[in-house]
Amino acid sequence: MDLVIRDARVIDGTGGASYRADIAVHEGRIAEIRREGEGPRPTGLCTLDAEGLALSPGFIDMHAHSDLALLRDPEHTAKAAQGVTLEVIGQDGLSYAPVDDRTLAQVRQAITGWNGDGGDIDFTWRTVGGYLAALDGAHGGQGIAVNAAYLIPQGTVRMYALGWDDRPATPAELDRMKQLVAEGMREGAVGMSSGLTYTPGMYADDSELAELCKVVAEHGGYYCPHHRSYGAGALQAYEEMVNLTRTAHCPLHLAHATMNFGVNKGKAPDLLALLDDALARGADITLDTYPYTPGCTTLVAMLPSWASEGGPEAILGRLRDDATAEKIRHHMEVVGADGCHGVPIEWDTIEISGVSDLGLTAFVGRTVKESADLRGEAPWVTARRLLVDDRLGSTILQHVGHEENVRAIMRHPVHTGGSDGILQGTKPHPRAYGTFPQYLGRYARELGVMSLEETVAHLTSRPAARLRLADRGVVREGYRADLVLFDPETVAAGSTFDAPRTLPTGIPHVLIDGRFVMRDGLRTDVLAGRAVRRTP
């Protein structure tokens, strides 16, 4: 054998009881599992003593924003050090394929706050297949740090077919979008995402979305919406997605399925009852969450949708016009903009986490209200100035979540883990570096929200089943040796809101295809990650 891992506590990903065993790895796969006392122990060219460590399948991040980070950073330690061996990218309806030159320029500006402006990236591709090939050939042809699966971004597809107009698609435009989705699915995407509080994806009505979902379903994929509201009307927004995918006969995966803002305090049971009813009637539904209460997005995402029609330059033009800017303020502060989930914005909950223009770094780490108070001005004046001066590139933490909702949702049987990790900014959300050890350490060991075995199942086999991965997500002979070894007594997220880029503790070893990407707590130079394409 290439490697034998001895005396590990195997938590196999199924949710069943752990057991003690030796695990033999050969040519990238689990070749033998020899339980304690079952016979001769396997031998190998290399042996790792796992006494005191748990061994589990690699963790699958069902909601990641590493679309450019995987190409930019060969180490990608933010995810590798957590034990993540596969990320699902192309989230929230906005990413970089499929595009033409116009669309690429627009989407780069629109999500600068998520991924940077891409000035350091060679955008050689225009198709989904081209992007996946770029991942495979990254870093001098060696590949990427961890595996990656891709969702076709519905907002980008709409941008490509009809621009940023807030109107129904014509039959010809709808046919073009369906063609783009079909091509992306054939080229290896695992499904389609939407960002229905982000423009231009939010301009699509349910009939348009259903037609695209039918294409996704025909190709064996799933639909992953960031739905129309996580605040006022959240339950109706969830129900809309359930009904839409029932019509389209398409599997549904609810992105960062939270119940936020004051109007939803204590209402997680209402969401779970809705899902349980749909599941009982045969719906195919899963969801992901991150184990924190604050959210993270861009400041421009808070604007009303009408203010975003036409794209980034049109937004900036409206913000520079005093009369239009006052209308925007009224919608945000009084009416409740759809970009802010129908809830009047509370500037003391909006913390600036990153800026594109480093000359604006003084805003980072303060709420908009705190910066406004220091300047002696109204919060909207501060926010407007920041939006314009940073050319819409500012990211925010939104402190609007509820701990009881977080815990209730993560217990649900269809729950999976997703970091929603944005890696940009001076002070990113700690979930980007800490989601998976946070589940294992705080929520399993310290709080006992779930057993360790059940927690691991949420992070491994359940997402693998959603992605239709036949040989990942479980410690089983013949499966890929994507493995994590961690100390159940010490594993913890090192990242905090004050020090968000601190790496976790208690995860010494991570393997992808039987190769160490983390060894003794240090990142190796191994690039074992590749694009994981949809299984036909």
Image (cartoon, rainbow, N blue to C red):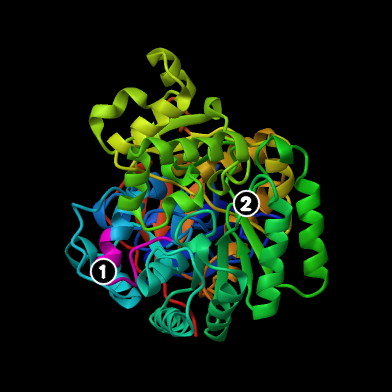
Q: Quadrant of the N terminus?
A: bottom left
Q: Secondary structure at mark 1?
A: helix
Tell me residue 68's x, y (percent). 30, 56
Q: Is residue 314 magenta?
A: no
Which residue is at a point 82% across and 56% down the rendered structure image? 273
Q: Nearer the viewer, residue 257 or 70?
A: 257
Residue 199 falls in image quadrant: bottom left
Q: Nearer the viewer, residue 317 or 495?
A: 317
Q: Secondary structure at mark 2?
A: loop
Q: Is residue 481 visible?
A: no
Q: Is residue 95 magenta?
A: yes
- Residue 229 image label: 2
Tell me residue 270's x, y (percent). 80, 50
Tell me residue 385's x, y (percent). 34, 31
**Which is closer to the viewer, label 1 or label 2?**
2
Q: Nearer the viewer, residue 121 or 35?
A: 121
Q: Nearer the viewer, residue 481 or 268?
A: 268
State yes or no: discs 1 and 2 in contact (Cβ < 8 Å): no
Q: What is the three-letter code of the residue carrying label 1? A: Ala
393 to the left or right of 343? left
Sequence-first disc among 1 and 2: 1
Residue, disc 1: 134
Q: Determine the residue located farthest toward the front in the rendered image.
A: 323
307 to the left or right of 230? left
Which residue is at a point 50% across and 70% down the rendered structure image? 192
Q: Which residues are magenta?
A: 94-105
Residue 267's place in the image compared with 95, above or below, is: above
Which residue is at a point 60% across and 66% down the rendered structure image? 39
Q: Mark 1: few, some, or many residues within 10 Å (few <14, many ≥20)?
A: many
Which residue is at a point 60% across and 41% down the rendered structure image? 336
